[in-house]
Structures are given as C-alpha cells and as structure tokens.
Amino acid sequence: MRTIIVLNPKGGCGKSTIATNIASYFAIKGKKVTLADCDPQGSSRDWLSIRPNAYSAINGIVVEGDRLQVPRNTDILIIDTPAAVDDKRLKKYLRKAQSLVMPIIASPIDIRAAEHFLKELFSFKGSIDNKIKIATIANRVREDTLIAAKLEHYLDNVKLPNGKKLPFMTMLRASQNYIHAAERGLSIFELPPSKTYYDREQWAPLLRWLTSKRSLPSK
Ligand SMILES: Nc1ncnc2c1ncn2[C@@H]1O[C@H](COP(=O)(O)OP(=O)(O)O)[C@@H](O)[C@H]1O
Ligand SMILES: [Mg+2]
C-alpha cells in the first residue's frame, strides 16, 4: 500500500488542506483512497462528511492513538496529522509511510518552527531518506512578498543528514479556491479548471513527485 503522510506540528500550515486535495487527486485517478484523520479536530473527517456522493469516493478513518486500521483494498493511504504529536505516535505514523509532505507557511514564526521540527525529524535514527522520502512545500503564499522569498530561499537550501538537498517541491499561493473547495467537501481538482488553472500548475511538481520513484524510499 502506498502511504503518504502530511506532517508539520505547526497548526494552520495547511495539513488538512493538502491531505484532502491529495486524497481527491488520487480518487479522481480511480485509486481506492483512504484518508486517515489522526487529528481530534477532525478537519479531514468533517471534509469527508460533507463530500457529495456524486464525486469520486474516498474512504475515511478516524485514528485515535497510534493504531491505524486501514481497509484491505486501499491503494493509497493519506495520513492527516494533528498539530501536537508525541514522539511515540509520530514514529509509528512515520513507519507506515513512504513519503512525507511538509507544508510550511511564509511567516517568520512558521519558518523557525519548521527549522526546529526538521532538526527533530532528522535526529530520528534511520528513519530518514532510506526509509521515508520527505518533501517540503510552501503554502498559502502571497507572491512577491519578502517573506515568501525568504521561505523559498530557506527551503531551497535545507540539507538532509546525508548532505543531499531536501526536495522543495512547490509554492502554493493563498487562494480562495482552497476555501471554496473545502466548504463543499471538494478539492481544487474538482472545481472548474478555468478557475483553478494556476493552482493546478502549482500542484504539478508535487503530484509528479508523489507519482514517481523519487518519493519512494530506496530499498
Ligand atoms: N493555499 C491556501 N490558500 C488559502 N487558504 C488556505 C490555503 N491552505 C490552507 N488554507 C486555509 O488555512 C486554514 C488552515 O488550514 P488547514 O489545512 O486546516 O491547516 P492544518 O490542518 O495544518 O491545521 C484553513 O482555513 C484552510 O482553508
Ligand atoms: Mg488539520
């Protein structure tokens, strides 16, 4: 089973938004998708509960603690994580996944928090790169701002413990499209292409990564 975890302990960075959009993308492609909501706030669960039947089906599970009971026929499991996760649970979730997507907001506080968290993540012995591939994305970016450029510069230069570059996939702009989609239990891929053209373009590098071997650990 292909498992993708969306993780960053900073609240409001866009985990549930990214997780639900990834889930919908693969469901549209005909995959059997399970969206695991590990956050007691239940944003992904709520999104699924209002998702109209006419759209591609996504199976939802709510995870309390560290036990993930995933339906057997799942092709792709997307794990949406809470803001604060203790190390034990975090390591359990990480062991499940081949790929990790970390969304980061362009703000000084969020950038600093991301630095701390990446340091912690890299300190987990053996868990990084040969076991799980990590990619960062900038989210809710206001283009042409100084802080967006700072975040881009930072993410372009993060190194993995082995000295290789940590892949920085894309910048997703702040757009009402995400809000309008979320209100209806949909993704931007289910809104009219003419309205979401730019957002889809921004998603393309992340989706290419997620559907290529680059996001799979080398055995
Ligand atoms: N790219 C974006 N553009 C506009 N709003 C966004 C974007 N990404 C997330 N949001 C909004 O920001 C808020 C926090 O996002 P959410 O996905 O719930 O974060 P998290 O799950 O990390 O707490 C939500 O209201 C969401 O709709
Ligand atoms: Mg959330």
Image (cartoon, rainbow, N blue to C red):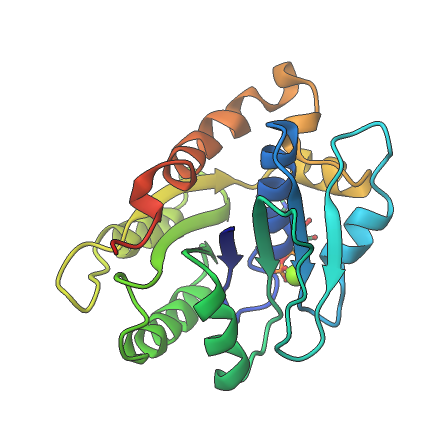
| Foreground pick, 133 / 139 | 133
Name the residue: 81% across, 54% down: 46
| Foreground pick, 75 / 160 | 75
Name the residue: 46% across, 66% down: 110
Q: Position of residue 76 (x, y in %)?
A: 57, 46
Please state if 41 lies on the left or on the right of 148 as rendered: right
Please state if 133 lies on the left or on the right of 181 as rendered: left
Q: Quadrant of the C terminus?
A: bottom left
Q: Position of residue 113 (x, y in %)?
A: 42, 72
- Residue found at the very far left of the displayed protein: 163
Q: Position of residue 29 (x, y in %)?
A: 59, 27
Name the residue: 70% across, 25% down: 191
Tell me how many marks there are.
Answer: 0
Above or below: residue 36 compared with residue 10? above
Q: Position of residue 155 (x, y in %)?
A: 30, 54
Name the residue: 31% across, 75% down: 119
Please state if 6 lies on the left or on the right of 218 as rendered: right
Above or below: residue 143 compared with residue 18? above
- Residue found at the very far top of the displayed protein: 194
Q: Quadrant of residue 209?
A: top left
